[in-house]
Every structure is written in C-alpha cells, then in structure tokens.
Amino acid sequence: MNIFILSAFTNTRIFLLTTLVVVFSICLHEFFHAWTALQFGDTTAASRGHLTLNPMKQMGPMSIVIFLVLGFAWGAVPVNPSVLRARSRHAPVIVSLVGPATNFGLFLIGFFTFGFLQTRIWNMIENKAVGTTILELFLLLGAYNCFLCIFNLLPVPGLDGWNALTEYFPRLKDPKSEFAKGITIFLILFLFLTAGRLFGLAFQLMELAPDLFSAG
C-alpha cells in the first residue's frame, strides 16, 4: 500500500498540488449535490451547511486524514430522496449524477488548459519553474477529475452510479435478494481490480491533450 504522505518529503510540490486538486474537486462535487438537491426542494444538505467548499464540512476530518496518509478520500452530503421524488421522479438521479458531471467539467478544464499551455504558451514562459508548476496543476486537475468522474459513475454501492441505478431498479437494494448480494460482491471486486488501471488511463488521456492542439 502506498503511503501518500511520504511524497511530501520526496516531491513536496506534487504532494501539495495533488492535495489541492483532490480536496477542491471533492468539495465542489459535494457542493453541487447539495445545491442541486436544494433546487428540487430538498433543504437537508443546505440546512446542515453543505453549500460550502469547506473540506471539514464536505469531507470531514477522517476523510482528510486518510487522504493525507494513504491518498484516497471521500465526501458526502445528506439528501432526502422522498422530497426529491415528490418534485420529480428523476430528481434523485439528477442529484446523484450532478457530482460526476462536476468532475467531468473540471476534467475538461484541465485537459484543454494543459494542452493549450504546453503547445501555445510554454515557449513564451520565461520562468520555467513556475510554468512547470502550472502545467502540473492542470495535468493533475484533469487526470484526477477524469478518474473521479468515471469512478463515481460505477454502479457500486455507495457511489453515485449505484444511487442513480437503484432509483430505476430498486430491487437491487433488497438485502434479502440473493441476486442483489451477488451483483454487489461482483461490483465491489470489479472496483478494486480496475481502480488502479482506471487511474493510469486518466493520465494517459491527459497526455493526448498537447497532440490535439498541435494537430490544430
């Protein structure tokens, strides 16, 4: 198991940039869950102070500590599905999917900014150390949010993809269903087996950004 905090001593800049990107991305993800729920009449998250980018509120101390030590984290906001369903049958699904959509938007910002800076701006930057830091910031922003978007869309219990799927297939949540138990175990195993590969693919995708601008 990788100990993320050790990178603070081996590559402090990447450690700080990664922390900034991940914490900001998770907090914005959770903010839009709360904000979208409020638009559909569910004040649960808003009334509990989740219309904020404060990581202590959106992630909590335990998530922050585990991220700093081991490099993975989570966030959560409370919602009331019954209130959402009363407004629209699709409201719970929209609230679930707006989080990954936020990560997708941040991925696009990182992807296009990274490609543009590296191909069109890099030669004009006199201070290469500052330029490298900026490039790394947008590389990490794009890669981590690509990962977060796809990861959260996986139909695995606890993730946004699962919450959206079970709104249309509620029997999957039946704890007495052998089928539900089987698919849950399979999906969790799939998640553990593919998370590392997915993360690598996110960085490979970001490396294509300069080629897009060079071709243009």
Image (spheres, grey):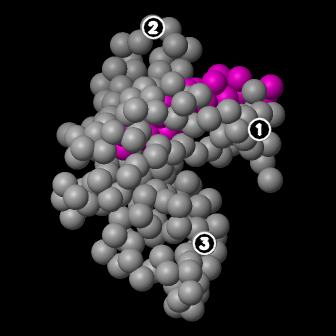
Which of 115/1 is in front? 1
- As helix, strand or loop, the secondary structure at mark 2 comes to loop
Determine which residue is flagged by label 3.
188
Which residue is depicted at the point 63% across and 24% down? 16
Q: Which portion, as a residue range, is magenta?
A: 9-34
Residue 171 lies in the magenta stretch = no
Q: Mark 1: few, some, or many residues within 10 Å (few <14, many ≥20)?
A: some
Q: Earlier in the sequence, mark 1 or mark 2?
A: 1
Which residue is depicted at the point 31% across and 44% down? 42
User: Of the residues shown, which amino acid type is indicated by label 2?
Assistant: Glu
Q: Which mark is residue 69?
A: 1
| CA distance for labels 1 and 3 | 23 Å
Which residue is depicted at the point 56% across and 14% down? 129
Asked whether, in this view, residue 178 is left or right of residue 172, the answer is right
Which of 84/99 is in front? 84
Determine which residue is flagged by label 2.
126
Q: Earlier in the sequence, mark 1 or mark 3?
A: 1
Mark 1 and mark 2 residues within 8 Å of each other at the beta carbon:
no
Residue 153, compared with residue 106, is above or below; it is below
